Amino acid sequence: MNSSLHPSRRSRAGYSLADTMIAATIIGIAVSAACSLTLGMNTQDEIAWRASRGTALLENATALYALGLEPATVLNLLPADPNAEVSFGEEAAETIEGLQLQAVDVSVTTTTADDTGSWTARSWTGGGDSTPPTRTTNARVYRSPFQLVPFP
Amino acid sequence: MRNIGNSRKGLPKRRQGSISVVALIICAVGTMGLLGIVSIMQARVVQVDAMEEECLRHIRESNGRQLAKDFAFRRIWTSASGDAETVEIPAGWGRITVPAWNRTAFTTTMRATVYNQSGPDPSGLPYQMSVDVSVFSRVDPETGDWITVAPRTVSTRIQSRPLANAGVLLDARSQNAVATVSGNLNVHGKAMIWQGAGSDNSFSFNAAQLYGYSGSVAKSNVEVQDLSGAGALAPRNLPGLTLPNWFAAAGSTLAPGAYPVIFNDDWAPFYSNAIAPSIEERAIAIGAISLAANTSYNRFGAVCNGAGVVTVDLNSLNLPSLVLDSPLSLTITGQTSAAARLAVENLAPVVIVIRSATLPAINFTGGNARPLIVALTSNDSASLTLSFGDGADYRLHLLADRQPLVLNSAGTSTLRGGIATDDDLTVGAGTFHLRAETAHPEWFDQLLWRSFWVETYQQL
């Protein structure tokens, strides 16, 4: 009679401390993993964004040079980017099988993340340096001296 | 009593199992979500890497197009034929293959079917010779070798137009980089000028529109006003390097802007290829008569007295084209009545080519409705004066090659046609109005010197 009105002590037993600790540990690991993953994702997203922006700058810089603009003018036209730097090498005349073209090296160096490491040979290496990781893409651009030139 | 069927936590075992399944499902869904995010991020990384490769491919293609353009300028339009050739930029930055060609861009009579309007004049269709160039842009990322399958086909179009007949009424270039175009000259159309960075040309006249040549155009000494004389004109175009004159500078002793088109005596590319592009040869090709100064001749309206005095009667229905060598005096007689004008206005164009260092002036009398091209050249710096009467209305295309000109009018004169010059052009007296040939511009197309430009066009 008594047992039917009040569940037995055993049947009323809740989670033990050990259960709780184990569950909390598992949840903690999962949450920290999720946080770490989120951080990694955000960092990777930032890297991808900066790298793609650097690529776009390189493409625009080379296209403007091919159109006939001088390197200094190209640099003035391109939008400023705190994480990417476009630079032109020395412009040179180059003769290729009798054709006479103008050529210049264009490079874009992108600071891909505010962390350490470096991008070399298509893979991330290093880490722990005092300088942030950068990614540099080089191209050699040619143009015929017969390209259109804007009226100043 | 043990409560059979219940867990020790007080829930029925069936219900406890349900919670576990739900928890596992949630975990599975969450894991799939995380995997999805990771996959998306991986795809983004791959895309960024591919974008870089794509960018480099675009640059290789752009380099190839530039190579094709340079090839067209330096080889195709300066030669009547050529063998197929592959040109490759070192280090894999560009590669083109040009097919063999055996046509002459300069004398083609084929019209363009598509026109990008990047040339000096956007109206109508120019003459065109096109060569389809294969542009390669893909390289094997492992070996760096070119992938030659399915290259991009770019149509390199060498287009030409007789500017003096196509809305560009004044085509002023510089033979010696110090040319001057000035005076009461009103161009009721387009004026196109050459002003290189190192030149000291001076342009001071009125025009409806201003266009510019040359790779590096300086604004100094360009004081072209609108037709009312009220304001300076700004150029309307992006000037492109043109065209024969540039090569004249590179291949001979002529200065940038030279216009050696009347006789092909000093322009190696055409002379060596013997493709007869000069105005002189064109005139002879249509039956021109060559007259030296000491020749006695009197037929069909052309009179030469044997002592250098020449008269040309534009009213003569059988007047041939003429090539005059060193005349001392020249009078061109036009029409003085409406009936006379009607009688000659639909005759075939007459070309008068004059090479003289001794001729001081040409007198144009009356008016003229007959199609007429006068081409002038000399090898000295003396000016040649062209005199017109007050109210003269002359249908005239004027080409001047190393020949400074002075236009004199007794009052106000109108020239209907274009002027192409590479030397000084000065209105010494009176006022001149330059208007377009509107009746039959197509009659002049095959005779006038053409200016060239090259454009590359993507074959779709």
Image (tube, coloured by chain):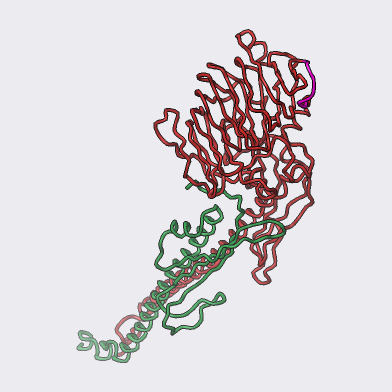
Chain colours: A green, B red
What residue is at 43 percent from the left and 58 percent from the top? A76
Q: Is residue B293 magenta?
A: yes
Q: Quadrant of residue B279?
A: top right
Question: In front: B256, or B238?
Answer: B256
Q: Majority secondary structure of the magenta segment?
A: strand
> What's drawn in magenta, residue-wise?
B291-299
Residue B163 can be seen, yes or no? no
Q: How many marks?
A: 0
B156, above or below A84, in the image: above
| Furthest-front residue in this view | B307
B198, above or below B286, in the image: below
Question: In front: B447, or B63?
Answer: B447
Q: Residue B291 appears at what percent x and percent y?
A: 77, 25
Q: Residue B447 appears at what percent x and percent y?
A: 70, 29
A51, above or below B355, in the image: below
Question: In front: B217, or B446?
Answer: B217
Quadrant the N terminus of chain B occupies: bottom left
Lateral position of residue A10 relative to residue B247, left or right: left
What residue is at 75 percent from the left and 22 percent from the top? B307
Residue B223 can be seen, yes or no? yes
